[in-house]
Amino acid sequence: MTTATSTQTDLFAWARELEQENKRIAEINAERVRNRGYLVFATHPSKGVDSAEYQQVYATEAHTPNQAIAKVRPLAEGRRLRAFLRTGKYREELADARWVG
């Protein structure tokens, strides 16, 4: 004979798991609040301005523009890099930007 308690959820264990998950989510959100979103434009000096290879756009999160550029630098070797807040005048570029984590 099976008892009803064998199929019931341990509410105390469930509450502990929920509390741990909420704490983890709060830590992630706190880190995201400290970071800002940046668009980093990587231009190639030897390519023509009308060339499709002239400019690449990257999106990332960082504390400062220099940190955003440092994240993109390994992907854009030999290119000039400039960072702008993603909510600024180039915000329409975000849709086509390549994400860098």
Image: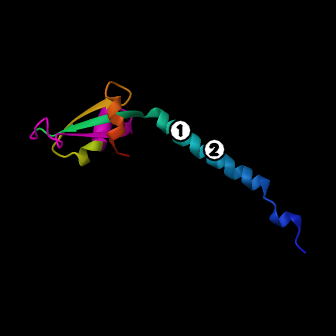
Quarter of image, res 91:
top left
Tag shown at residue 22: 2
| Alpha carbons under labels 1 and 2: distance apart | 10 Å
Disc 1 or 2, which lies upstream in sequence? Answer: 2
Give the magenta-colored segment's residue range: 46-71
Indicate the amino acid at tag 1: Asn
Name the secondary structure under disc 2: helix
Tag shown at residue 42: none
Quarter of image, res 70:
top left
Query: In the depicted view, which residue is nearer to us: 29 or 52?
Result: 52
Identified at 11% across, 38% down, the residue is 45
Query: In the depicted view, which residue is nearer to us: 60 or 93?
Result: 93
Query: In the depicted view, which residue is nearer to us: 56 or 11?
Result: 56
Q: Residue 22 location in percent, x, y?
A: 63, 44
Q: Mark 1 points at which residue?
A: 29
Looking at the image, the residue that sits furthest to the top is: 89
Indicate the amino acid at tag 2: Asn
Identified at 81% across, 64% down, the residue is 7
Identified at 19% across, 46% down, the residue is 77
Q: Is residue 6 above or below residue 78?
A: below
Magenta-drawn stretch contains 18: no
Q: Tell me the crowding category of disc 1: few under 14, some 14 to 19, or many 20 or more residues within 10 angstroms, Cα based.
A: few
Q: Residue 44 location in percent, x, y?
A: 15, 40
Query: In the depicted view, which residue is nearer to us: 52 or 65?
Result: 52
